[in-house]
Image: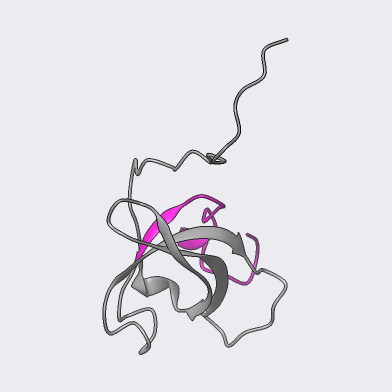
Amino acid sequence: MTGRHPPRYAELRCGDLLHVTGAASVQFVRLILFRVIRVHEDWHTYHGWLWLDGYEVDARGDAVARRSIFVQPAGLRRLADAPRPVAARPGRQAVAY
């Protein structure tokens, strides 16, 4: 991310796992876990706010809902060294050549 967002959150990237707290927006009365798909740098927002696309995830890291959220970065807590899920396609097997 560049320019418009606070530098502390300039490093948000696809795959990051975040705690989204009530400080991010009044809609988050209950803390959620959120896996970032995209940071919308080109969407015009109020100063200090961000649009994020991603998945709300459960405690096991499984996606439970796709969401676009409008948040203040002060309410986002990156989970350091959080494991990133490996995409698995049921019914597919590796093919050896």
Q: Residue at x 67, y 19 (%)?
A: 95
Q: Quadrant of residue 82?
A: top left
Which image quadrant for residue 2?
A: bottom right
In the rendered image, residue 2 lying in the magenta stretch gets the answer: yes
Observer-nearest of 79 and 44: 79
Label total for image: 0
Q: Residue at x 51, y 77 (%)?
A: 69
32 or 59: nearer the viewer = 59
Question: In this view, which residue lies farthest toward the front?
Answer: 91
User: Is residue 43 depicted above or below 89 in this figure?
Assistant: below
Q: Position of residue 87 (x, y in %)?
A: 53, 41
- Based on the picture, tell me whether residue 46 belongs to the magenta stretch: no
Asked whether, in this view, residue 4 is left or right of residue 81, the answer is right
Q: Give the image location of residue 77, x and y in percent.
A: 33, 62
Task: State the extent of the magenta-drawn residues as a range.
Answer: 1-19
Rendered location of residue 13, percent (x, y): 55, 53
Residue at figure coordinates x 52%, y 56% from the top left = 12
Hey, which quadrant is residue 41 in on the image? bottom right
Q: Residue at x 51, y 59 (%)?
A: 36
From the image, which quarter does the C terminus lie in?
top right
- Which secondary structure class fits the magenta region best? loop
Indicate how the structure is coloured in the image: one colour
Give above or below for 26 relative to 72. Answer: below
In the displayed structure, 28 sits above or below 90; it is: below
Where's the N terminus, which quadrant?
A: bottom right
Q: Position of residue 17 (x, y in %)?
A: 41, 54
The one nearer the camera, 85 or 21, is 85
